[in-house]
Image: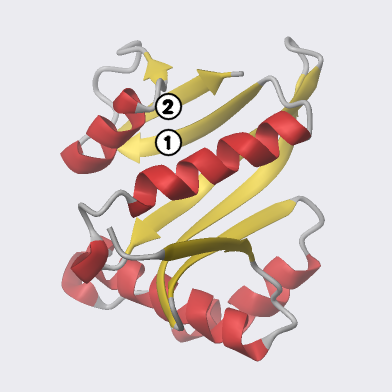
Amino acid sequence: MPSIEIIETDLSDPLHADALLGLLCDYASKLIVGGNGLSEQAKSNLISGLREHPTKLILLAWDNKTPVGFCVCMRGFSTFGGRGTINVHDLAVAEKYQGCGIGTAIMNRVFVEATASNCCKVTLEVERSNAGARRLYERLGFRGNDEFADSTMFFLEHPL
């Protein structure tokens, strides 16, 4: 595995903002039908919108000076658990770096942040067709159910 550093993103730093936007655009271009990626409106509003969002937790993974992965999370609250939660909204690793343990390292950092914040769980949604991500999340202890078997998404949680 490359020497990876995972840091909390400072969106007021142009280097961090550009790294996140570039990685997210690449990720979205592979997900959105037609490969068009994010709309121009989304691109122009993304950084300022995230910068102003009060519950964000954004992590960037770096290999030396190269951004290689990211995770965008939002903090929430579980009424049933009586404690905070962290929801993983987007997690991606640059294609060249996939399979090197970076996704696991990023998620382990999310668990550290969640534990430090006394959260009761980490949640996420994953596309049914994304077998690689589903294997990662299952290996990390995320569980869900097939209650909505006709859905294209799985809702998973990792109790803390």
Q: Residue at x 47, y 42 (%)?
A: 107
Q: Residue at x 64, y 77 (%)?
A: 47
Q: In the structure shown, which secondary structural element does the residue marked by tag 1 occupy?
A: strand
How crowded pointer 1 is (Cα within 10 Å; few <14, some 14-19, many 20+) is rated as: some
Would you say the residues marked 2 and 1 are in contact, meaning their CB atoms lie under 8 Å apart?
Answer: yes
Q: Residue at x 27, y 64 (%)?
A: 32
Residue 158: x percent and y percent?
Answer: 51, 22
Residue 120 vertical placement versus 39 (above, below):
above
Q: Quadrant of residue 86?
A: top right
Where is mark 2, residue-wise? 155
Residue 80: x percent and y percent?
Answer: 73, 10
Exactly how many numbered labels are in the figure?
Answer: 2
Residue 152: x percent and y percent?
Answer: 27, 34
Q: In the structure shown, which secondary structural element does the residue marked by tag 2 occupy?
A: strand
Residue 73 vertical placement versus 140 (above, below):
below
Q: Quadrant of residue 45?
A: bottom right
Residue 138: x percent and y percent?
Answer: 31, 24
**For the N terminus, which image quadrant?**
bottom left
Q: Amino acid at mark 1?
A: Glu
